[in-house]
Amino acid sequence: MSEHLTEDIDQITVTDKAAAEVGKIRNENNIPENFLLRIGVKGGGCSGLTYSLGFDGEVRDTDEVIEINGVKLVIDAKSLFYLDGTELDFSDGLSGRGFVFNNPNAVRTCGCGSSFGA
């Protein structure tokens, strides 16, 4: 896997809680260190766009690799546009357990919180 690490991009943040959960998931599932956390945006959902999140062992030429708070993220160029300024957090509160995208670009969101419009 070849990768190019972009260090001057600071549009996305990863909270301490999210970074800890990524590490926990990686350890519990024996995910190799060369697999990066791919975050993205794709069409779908009731508001038009949905987030995607998962480990990926492939970095494409058009991807950006960013290390934030100890987490190496891989993001395709199209998604990076929609994720500018986004905070990746983790919630384990009463309303559910999971990763949360706090995206300032979302002009509308759906009731389930998994899709948005920009």
Image (cartoon, rainbow, N blue to C red):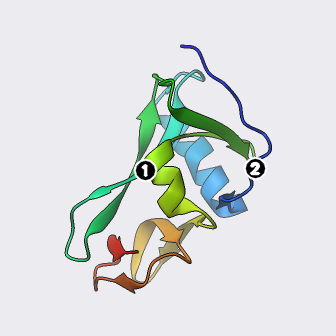
Q: Amino acid at mark 2?
A: Asn
Q: Residue shown at 39%/83% (left/top)?
A: 95
Instruction: Work out whether mark 2 precedes mark 1 in sequence or the reverse, and give the earlier one.
Output: 1
* Tag 1 residue: 40
Label 2 and label 1: CA atoms lie apart by: 18 Å
Q: Is residue 110 above or below residue 84?
A: below
Left or right of residue 46: residue 32: right
Q: Nearer the viewer, residue 3 or 100?
A: 3
Left or right of residue 25: residue 12: right
Instruction: Give residue 57's position: percent from left, percent from top.
Output: 46, 23
Residue 23 sits in which quadrant?
Answer: top right
Q: Is residue 16 above or below residue 56?
A: below
Instruction: Give residue 80's position: percent from left, percent from top.
Output: 53, 52
Q: Residue shown at 49%/26% (left/top)?
A: 30
* Tag 2 residue: 69
Q: How packed is label 1: few (under 14 Cα within 10 Å), some, or many (20 or more)?
A: many
Q: Residue shown at 28%/86% (left/top)?
A: 111
Secondary structure found at label 2: loop
